[in-house]
Image: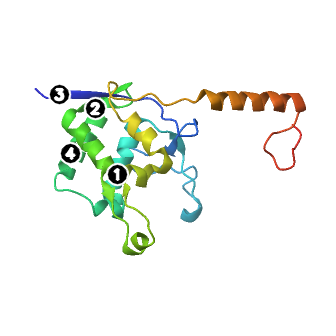
Amino acid sequence: MPSFKTVENKGINSVFAKPLMISVRDDDGDIVWKDPNVDEAKRVPTLEQAKPQSIIREILLSINGLEALRRIQKPNDGFRAHRLWNQLERAKESEYIRLRSEEYEWLHSLLSRKVPVNKEAKDAGVEDRTVASQLYGINEWMVCNALKSIDERQEEEHDETEDRIAADGQLAAAATGKILGSPSGAER
């Protein structure tokens, strides 16, 4: 009997504690544009807050869509990607996504694979990045953590000092009527 991992399908925040936004995709995997009749170079995608289901879909679409990821594919990737896609389709906007342990482990190993940089970048001292880092940059940890099972997910670190500084800044701004951090000290 196969074992399963359960991933909570709730909104993901960025490292800036704001919703991590990604492009909306239609059922065929194409980006939904705000105005599809505008010149292609000027189109703006419709955005939504990222959830594990939409992030996994983006990862699966990127495997063949990005040259850097095509180069690091392994023979079993197509099989695992297909099974993972089917599991996502069964979860359709539910609160939890139930993934088979094999596909769950494959997904996390895919995200931790190194994407080699070209020779010029390597000579300049640029190191290889992971797939997660390549796709999500500084939000890599936030995305990988959101894709973990409920039992394995880590709580986001929350610095009370940052809260106190932010609160002090808001109090000072309210008292002076000035917007802190603006070069001109603009009035509210």
Residue visible at 41% across and 73% down? 123
Q: Position of residue 89 (x, y in %)?
A: 30, 36
Task: Please name which of the two marks, 3 or 2, marks the residue nearer to the observer.
Answer: 3
Badge 4: residue crowd in 10 Å (few <14, some 14–19, many ≥20)? some
Taking the image as drawn, is residue 28 in sight? Answer: no
Taking 23 as reference, is 122 above or below it? below
Asked if the residue at tag 1 contacts the one at tag 3, i.e. Cβ–Cβ closer than 8 Å, the answer is no
Give left or right: position of 128 versus 86: right
Q: Nearer the viewer, residue 107 or 25?
A: 107
Of marks 4 and 2, the one in the foreground: 4
Residue 61: mark in rendering: 1
Could you tell me residue 5's position as x and y percent? 26, 28
Residue type at mark 2 is: Arg
Q: Is residue 50 left or right of residue 86?
A: right
What whole-number distance in Å separates the C-alpha atoms at marks 4 and 2?
Answer: 16 Å
Q: Is residue 66 shown to the viewer in this render?
A: yes
Q: Calculate the distance from the C-alpha at mark 1 to the C-alpha at mark 4.
A: 13 Å
Q: Which residue is mark 4?
A: 80
Mark 2 or 1: the one toward you: 1
Q: Residue furthest left?
A: 1
Task: Identify the amino acid type marked 1.
Answer: Leu
